[in-house]
Image (spheres, rainbow, N blue to C red):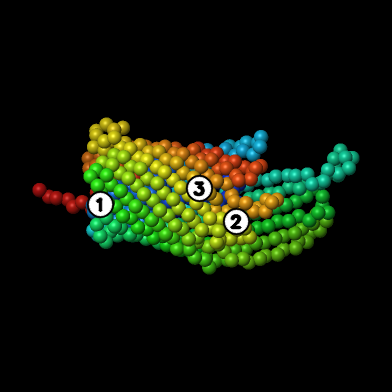
Amino acid sequence: MLAILIANVALRAENGMNSPYTRYGLGQLSSMETGTSKGMGGTGIGLRNSNQINLLNPASYSSVDTLTFLMDIGLSLHNANFSEGNMKMNARNTTFDYFAIQYRLMPKLGMSLGLMPISNIGYNYSNSTIINKGDGTNNGEDQTNSTNVYYGNGGLRQIVMGLGWEPIQGLSVGANFSYIYGEIYHYIHNQYNDPAINTMTKQYSTDITTYKIDLGVQYQFVSGKSRYTLGATYALGHPIDDVAYIQTMMTSGTSTTANIKKDTVPSFSIPTELGAGISYNYDNRLTIAADYSMQQYSRVKFFDMPGADRHRASLGVEYTPNSLHRNLFKRAHYRAGLHYSTSHFMIQHDAGYTKGPHEYGISVGIGLPIMNRYNNKTIINISGQAVRVEPQVPGMITENYLRLNIGLSFNERWFDKWRIE
């Protein structure tokens, strides 16, 4: 419980964001990837490894060894570059990614507990435009300028409890039960240098507490030194009972009174999600995995903005020269991956609504086993990611990220019985 409390504090304190796109939808979405998946492009639906926690498919929990206790914790360091035309800006921040534990309850039944973010929101920027140049007299003092200020923070987090069961040899099923909580706040202020023109302020806010259920299945079969795993996931979509608020305030520079209007709108929904994955393992040395998932955000409205279906595809590979070799780099796990995803929100512009930016990413990583007197299964997972967020409409912001992901996966034989000789 202390470890979960510490992780919860870290989630609240360290998830700084700088992206203007977190103004839309739920913000910047996080996944349930652990250190292994991050180095393999975010794959995991078809991955099954008794020495690693895989939260992307709860059916994988049944693979945990009877005597093993697993604990995994990770964080990321981000360097972001934002560009629009000739303007560029850099930003750095740190995020807490996940905390999870896993152990076996009984033969063929494994359990996991975890804490991680679902989304993060953080932005603060402004822009100014000239709406009337005036008649060119008085040194431009009759020029009318408009300034928009945008600010937002918050995000959603989840506490996860999952079970994975292997009822028959090779076939496993599982479920994650999540408690979701968090808050979302957006602020927009529009003002003019002409006091005769009204100033408008809009505030969007909601507090969310709800649940989510993810179901998973995996089927694994072996042929010689080759092992094949097929996986699928399904999340139950449902509306959230909480409400959201949109408050509009109109004021004039010539008056001290304000016209305030507060509207109550339905809160967001949990989208239905579908996923499929496959992995191939040869001789416990080479693993190749591929995933596809779809989230039906098109059925979700974010305050007064529509959502869009989010599609994600990923491909990953892991190679271990010799897991039993005494040389550290011979028994290390070398990883690489690719991913592509679309946005879960729509952006309004002059021509109407268009889908948000697409994301492209590449990752490379390494898992370094820590040798102790019991085993060499405790692993330091390090991976680097290069991600590009590219808008679908010319003139919008392009984001480029360099991320360093660091995770520590403890694997200890806590349930081994001591023998007295």
Q: Which is nearer the eye, 240 or 43?
A: 43
Question: How far across and how far down the image is residue 300, in percent?
Answer: 56, 61
- Mark 3 is surrounded, within 10 Å at the Cα level, by few (under 14), some (14 to 19) or many (20 or more) other residues, namely some
The residue type indicated by label 2 comes to Tyr
Residue bearing mark 2: 185
Q: Which residue is mark 3?
A: 341
Residue 186 horizontal/vertical position (percent)? 62, 55
Task: Give the answer, above or below, for where 245 lies relative to 392.
Answer: below
Q: Which mark is residue 65?
A: 1
Within-10-Å neighbours for mark 1: few <14, some 14–19, many 20+: many
- On screen, residue 341 versus residue 49, left or right, reads right
Q: Position of residue 408 (x, y in %)?
A: 36, 43
Residue 41 lies left or right of residue 351; in this view the side is: left
Q: Is residue 98 above or below residue 388?
A: below
As shown in the figure, which amino acid type bears the numbered disc 3?
Answer: Ser
In terms of secondary structure, where does tag 2 sit? Answer: strand
Name which residue lies at 42% across and 37% down.
364
The reply to whether callout 3 and callout 1 are in contact (CB within 8 Å) is no
Q: Amino acid at mark 1?
A: Asp
- Residue at position x 20%, y 51% in the image: 416
Q: Quadrant of the N terminus?
A: bottom left
Give how far across and how far down residue 158 sits, in percent: 45, 57
C-alpha separation, residue under disc 1 versus residue under disc 2: 44 Å
Q: Earlier in the sequence, mark 1 or mark 2?
A: 1
Disc 2 residue crowd, few under 14, some 14–19, many 20+, Cα 10 Å: some
Instruction: Answer above or below: position of 248 versus 29.
Output: below
Element at badge 3?
Answer: strand
Dot 3 or dot 1: first in sequence order is: 1
Q: Nearer the viewer, mark 3 or mark 2?
A: 3
